[in-house]
Amino acid sequence: MSHSTFSNRILWIRALWNGFLALILGFVLYMIPGIIIGLKMGFDLGPKMKDSPEVTTQIRETISKMYQENVMLMAGYIISTCLLILWRARVVTKGTGDKKLINGFLVGFIPALLGLLFIFTKGFNLISLVEIIVFIGSGLLGSTLQKKST
């Protein structure tokens, strides 16, 4: 395939896959504090409380409360996913010429789609709306930051 033909293509599968990858990596980063606290609590409470279901219940309630009440964790999730989308959008749009905005939009589309699904299933909340706007915007921004191919 010649370079001129490749430079005007919309890379649907590649862009959507990279958006999904950014979403998964952002979610893994979001879950790391909960995993660390859960492990720490398990090692602390396990020897003290011989009742395994009680330890599990305490860990589950603590981590659930932490993720529900801590706005900084959600902000960290949005920022880390946004940065991952920027990175992946730059990679996908490299050499796509005039179609780079569409490709960048597609990278941000999958994470934004998840925010839209949360609005439909859990009801409207401001954080989901911010996620949608930021994820789409970061995909578009990542594609515009990509230098024009020669």
Image (cartoon, rainbow, N blue to C red):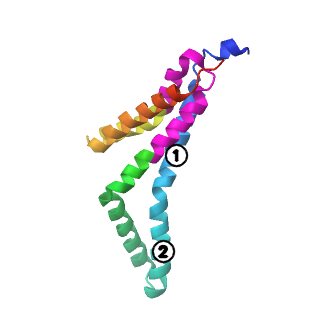
The 10 Å Cα crowd at callout 1, few under 14, some 14 to 19, many 20 or more, is: some
Compared to residue 18, the image places residue 77 above or below, namely below
Magenta extent: 80-107
Write the residue at 50% across / 25% down.
Answer: 144
CA gap between label 2 and label 1 equals: 24 Å
The residue sitting at 30% across, 60% down in the picture is 69
Q: Position of residue 34 (x, y in %)?
A: 44, 63
- Does the magenta-highlighted stretch encompass residue 57? no
In the drawing, does residue 90 fall left or right of residue 63? right
Q: How many marks?
A: 2
Q: Is residue 96 magenta?
A: yes
Which residue position holds label 1?
24
Say whether residue 117 is visible. Answer: no
**Quarter location, residue 100:** top right
Residue 76 seen in the current view = yes
Going by the numbered disc 2, the residue's amino acid type is Lys
